[in-house]
Amino acid sequence: LQPHAPDAPKPQQRRPGRRCWEAPSPADQSWSPQSAEDWPGSDEWDVCDMLTQDYLQRYCDGVDLAEVEALEICVDAVRQNVDALGRCLPNLLRLRLSGSSIMCVRDLGAHLQQLQVLWLGSCGLQDLSGVTLMEALRELYLPFNDVSDVSALKWLDLEVLDLEGNALSDAKDLWELGRIASLRHLTLRGNPVAPPVGGAEWQELRKELGAKLPLLEALDDEAVDDEVICPEEVESVSTWEKGWRFLDHYLETDLELYMDLFLCQDEGPEEKEASSPGRRAWRGLRPAAETAFGSEPDEEELLLERLRAPRVIRPGDTVPLGSPSTRGQVGAFTLLPRRPLEPDDGSVLTRGEAMAGNVLGALKARRGESEALLLDLDIRELLRRSEGALALTYASSETCFLRLEKPLEEPPFSQADEDRLLTHFGNNINLNGTGAVIASPGACPALVECCNIMDKQPYGFHWTRDASLSLLTYLEHSKQFLEVEEGEASLLQTHRGKKQNTMRDEIEHSIDAFAGWVEGVHARKMAANNMGGSTSAAEEAYLEPKWTFDGEPYKGGWCRPQTDGPPLRARLLMKAAKVFPNLKERLWPLAKKDLDWLVDNFAMNSCDLWEETRDDDFVWNRVVQLSALAEGADFTENPNDKQRYLDAIQQKGEPLANHIAGESGEEYITNCPASNMGEDCVRYDKQLDGVLILTLIHGHPMVATDAVKLPSFLDAKVANTVKQLCLVFCKSYPINTQDTDAKVPGVLLGRYELDHFGHQSQGNPWVLITASLANLLYKAAAEVSQGGKADPAWANVFQNSKGDWWHSGWTGSAKDFIAAGDGVLKRLRHHMKDGMHLYEQIDKHSGEQWNAKDLTWSYAEVLGAMQSRRKALKLCGGTSGSCH
């Protein structure tokens, strides 16, 4: 498709590697790149910088941004303020964002009013809202997205529209397109509503659109007036021919997948004799496989699904600029070499004859001859597991988790350290007597970088989740803060006893104030309408995650709704009612409100814990909801309520249903559903997420119950989950390797591999997740002391203090687990350079703490880990020296 004349004038001052082009002259406004010289074909750039004026100035080699008319860049609308493109480049005429992550055109803002040509191929685009603000737009390229509604386009004077591989499924969509009278070139193939090119239905469609659109010259790259041969009139159309045509539009996206799915399917006569034994074996197996699973999606459908998915921009990624003149030429691209697999190398999904490049075909064939467990797997799930199995085959199986050989003689945080931590922690609770808990009083440069939020205290709000978890930790100190050791001097006993009583009174006062805060939230009458006009003020009390200190929902943009707040709040209130019986009459009715709401709404689609992605089955939300209901059934004295809560648990199912992945013996827990993941989970690849550690720590019911059971901390699935997370973050965080090489024990964990929330959009280790790992290890030690036995899988998680792998002296004793937890806290303590102040993150390069100083939740997790350490030592023998 060549909408511009090939002899169109070229802009001036262009040189190889440029990504921005100045305006050459008023006569050259129609220029569009047509050759390898026009598009820089080999340059690459880092996508992690934020779209500030300074960055765009550097990106364009110092050119005056007001003079830039053409720009090619890759962006992530979730993490970057992409509307800056229009604000900083006021005269932009041509913008190429293909391969970016943009779900709605409105994310581009309202400042691209002069834009004439826009490329948004394979961006995960779903919503065209906001496109009408681009009044000058003449050419719009949207191939391989998920657009299902094109009604907004009728208000534009488009001449070229490419909708290949989208989700148009209704004839009315074609009628809407028929109202764009200015259209000259239209591409529809690959949509459910579009008939095959050249067929009788397509010929009829071409006639109808030609009648409606008087200027239409081409449909699906075929001239409206040309004769097109129907596919059924041709004896055979090779997969090579179909493949190259499909590739011609979007070769630079997922080339290796394309090679797997298309280019190794069929060979001509000249290739068959020279084909490999593996490929000949596949030809023999394919007919039976295609017969058994013929109803499954074919290769073209799977490729369309992959191309429609948004491009995930990884921290540190570079994005190659493609050239239209090189599309379709494999020699223009370099594929990463694959390590050949030996027979029986790997899992049931990868072993056997070499796949000859055709992963999908081989999987279909091998499923027919493999264990019964594979026969019922959907082909998409089979492909996903195969990709994961291959990735694990090539990846190192060694973590950087450096384990101490024995517990520290002195705790990782001294009593003086813990006192200071508790002071900083307490300063954030019951803020100004309101009952609210401030998330952090510190600055948040990460929010400035990701979202251009310039508030002095952007975390200066009350989060239902953070407050509930923090107060639960605070509550624990009312029972065991500064416990008096046997044999201590009476004066010291008296001093500590008084301090403990004072602390208990402060905690009780804070819980009482918090109850008043919750009552105020429920008493609101006027809805904030952040989630639409149908959400009442009463519903907002459960669904709004973030609140101002005067008891009103935060009114800015945020991920809503969030369904983990009510169960966590209910659990806190029930626990507090047991610790402070005099508050029970006030606390239980509030907890019951949350539980009753939960019974009716536990299947609601929700944001995840990190407030980024949406699904109706995140493991964190699922587990804390089930545990809250189990604790409610234990707490209530009303048999009807008890039965309702137990029935809801039964209806929701097992805590980890559809959240176990991995081969037999290597199963681990997943954050997103193990199969049938939602688009957001695929987009961010959040299967392995630090939230899994938090789920294991905070998900176990705090009462004895058979209604909800999670794996023991000693279980193989828990060990494998920890190992998988260590593998991810040992690879992702240079500071982990540096620490291990320097013999600093422990390991640092973060959120997930594709995390962008950090300096220059690069995810970092998180203090609270790392501390929760130490907590998990101390809880495992307590289970061993109470008669549990650690699964041998735990030995695969660690190196020993000498850096040796496998033969690390690990026995699975309580002493081993306490030593491992001590190592984690020691590494964390190693990076605390600002006294006893805790932040949100640790820079993955420098090791300095960063973002959200005095984060309340960080204090809660570190203090909670220290509480668990004391319990583990007490069960183990009382001291680190006596523990065995």
Image: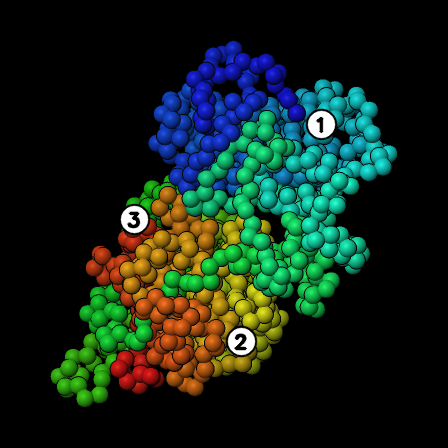
Q: Quadrant of residue 873?
A: bottom left
Tell me how far mark 1 sits from mark 2, CA to CA. 58 Å
Identify the residue position indicated by label 2 in the image: 708
Relative to 719, does residue 443 appear above or below in the rendering? above
Can the viewer see residue 541?
no
In the rendered image, residue 613, in percent from the top left (x then y), is placed at 51, 52
Q: Is residue 544 left or right of residue 605?
A: left
Relative to 169, does residue 615 appear above or below in the rendering? below
Tell me how far mark 3 sits from mark 1, CA to CA. 54 Å
Q: Quadrant of residue 503?
A: bottom left
Q: Nearer the viewer, mark 3 or mark 1?
A: 1
- Residue 443: mark in rendering: 3
Tell me how far mark 2 sits from mark 3, CA to CA. 40 Å
Which residue is at a point 70% across and 61% down the rendered structure image? 367
In the rendered image, residue 116, in percent from the top left (x then y), is placed at 55, 23
Chain-order first, disc 1 or disc 2: 1
Under mark 2, the amino acid is Val
Tell me whether circle 2 and circle 3 mark residues in contact (CB < 8 Å).
no
Identify the residue position indicated by label 1 in the image: 221
Callout 1 environment at 10 Å: few (<14), some (14 to 19), or many (20+)? some
